Image (cartoon, helix red, strand yellow):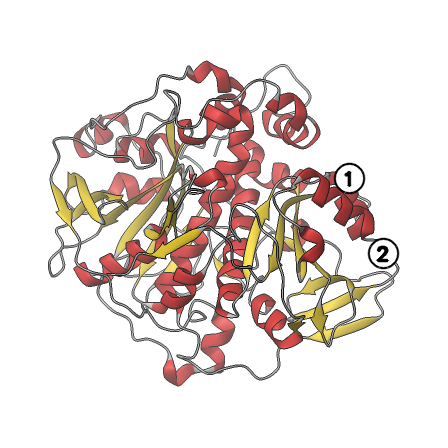
Amino acid sequence: MTYGTASGTGESVGLRFWHRTFEGVRELFAEGHGEEGGADDPLPVKTYRGLPRQVLSEPVRALGDARWSFAAFRRAFPAGRPAPRRLDEPAVSALLGYAYGLGRLELGPYAVWPYHRLVASARCFYPVEVYLWTAAAADGLPTGCHHYDPAHHALTRLRAGGIPDAVRSAVGGWGDQCGPLALLFTAVCFRKTAFRYRDYAYRLCAQEAGLTVGNVLLVAGALGLHGRVHHRFDDGIVNRALGLDGDEETAFAVVQLSCAEPSAAAPVPAPAAAPAVLDSALPVIRPEHLRTDTADPDAWAGLREVDRAARLTCGDAWPPVDPVAFRLPADVPGADARVPLDGPQPGPGELELAAALRARDSGGRMFLPGGAALPAHRLAAMLRYAVEPVASDHTRGDCRPLVDCHVLVLGADGLDAGLYRLEPSPALVRLPGRDWRAVLAMLCDRTPAVNSAKADALVFLTVNRCQGERGFGARGYRILHQEAGIVAQRISVLAAVTGLSVRITNGYHEGLVRELTGVGDAAYVPVFCMVVGRRRATAQYEVPLTW
């Protein structure tokens, strides 16, 4: 396994990018922005030309319980879990439609960003593209590699045939014996966000890739499918397989979809693929797609540099990581109360995932939370499964996300206002004596479109950037943001079940948040701030896109 580094320097490209994006945001924005709605604004949906297309059938109206992807919930209710199923056309329609399809259409005089998908995206740019490679033909769905077009709920076939051995090896092998039903790839088209945010777009793109992967896992679980996330794969082979140039658009994560939970066997080491094998099994393709913008990609050269440094190649086995090394110490100095979150909960079928995804929103362009205080049991329902383990290539089995979570409770019945740390048990541990007024004032000042002072709670997700560098090299930047994105999507969807909106904001001062959480080690950095509250009625009218 090889990681790219900055030659001739004592600091890797990845760590330099951490410093730049967290300490030099003002300089990044000073580079200039592309104009939304003008010639620089790319199309929000990637559309291919001259390739076979298949319009998918109407997605089912109900998916199943929103909690089936969590192992703890499946253990608590073993009799009601969804049965494993084939990945036929109706299943693919539901999987893709609810994972990354259009959810709402915004109308009226304030409709600046009219098209809303089922995951959050900075300014609704949606840089993530989703590809699905099916292993075998199923009813109504041919075998092959397909791109998902959310605007038309359709598949465009890029390659025919099952998953080639070269792609299987490049992803790193399977944890089960029967192999996957399909591989789902999330790729990022940098131009969609970088035309405006320049180099800072790398952070936003990695976060959205994580949100999308998190949503795929939720939907797959409700459908009776098991998802395993691969963060480490041979970028060159995967990009070649999908027909991506690897510069403007590149693969970020792979989700292995199986019909049952695999054993905890170690992934198969990935042997190097010989060029001759690649040429015969994966001939180079460059499918044509519609382009409208003319922005110069040199404007985000720093982004492309760190992405190139993060590339991996096959060769050696990709070793597991120690998840404990990524997290804060288990003991919490000064903790004075522990609030368990594992009390009674609604049974299977009472929290419908499809309804939650349609209800999930970010509070509108001007988010003024309001209403009565949040009941403590609803806050518990939102957080209970936030850091549940994920099946991934980090370890041989499931692995708790490489993320720490703090919750600033502002208005919840039954809970004192103040800062809490989320434990995986699950429980909230109160951290007394923290002055959070400065953080609230900073958030209201830096993000005036969101009145954080009126929120029910603020959630901060923190990662260990130095351990990410040690474990993953320059790839650690995007992996840790994707891990945080998986957790953020869980919180957003389970909040929607309880009637809450969640606004993700990057407009905060890192130092003040670190001071609030009491994290003295500069290696730990907050990468997400989530504002939680009830959305008030406004002139913004968003129509649910129902079939």
352 relative to 520, above or below: below
Which element carries disc 1, helix, strand or loop? Answer: helix
Q: Give the residue at mark 2.
A: 434
| Residue drawn at point x = 31 percent, y = 61 percent | 258
Which element carries disc 2, helix, strand or loop? Answer: loop
Q: Which mark is residue 511?
A: 1
Residue 495 in percent (x, y) is at: 53, 64
**Quadrant location of residue 58?**
bottom left
Q: Is residue 80 left or right of residue 291?
A: right
The earlier-in-sequence mark between 2 and 1 is 2
- Give the distance between the C-alpha atoms of the residues marked 2 and 1, in whole angstroms: 14 Å
Q: Residues within 10 Å of mark 1 (few under 14, many from 20)?
A: some
| Residue drawn at point x = 59 percent, y = 29 percent | 14
**Quadrant location of residue 103?**
bottom left
Residue 285 in percent (x, y) is at: 20, 27
Q: Nearer the viewer, residue 497 or 332?
A: 497
Q: Is residue 331 left or right of residue 2?
A: right
Residue 158 in percent (x, y) is at: 18, 37
Q: Quadrant of the C terminus?
A: bottom left
538 relative to 416, above or below: above
Amino acid type for the residue under numbered disc 2? Arg
Q: Is residue 541 left or right of residue 17?
A: left
Q: Which mark is residue 439?
A: none
| Residue drawn at point x = 43 percent, y = 67 percent | 69
**Quadrant location of residue 315?**
top left
Q: Nearer the viewer, residue 355 or 37?
A: 37
| Residue drawn at point x = 27 percent, y = 35 percent | 242
Q: Nearer the viewer, residue 222 or 233?
A: 222
Asked if the residue under mark 1 is in contact with the one under mark 2, i.e. CB atoms within 8 Å, the reply is no
Residue 446 in percent (x, y) is at: 69, 38
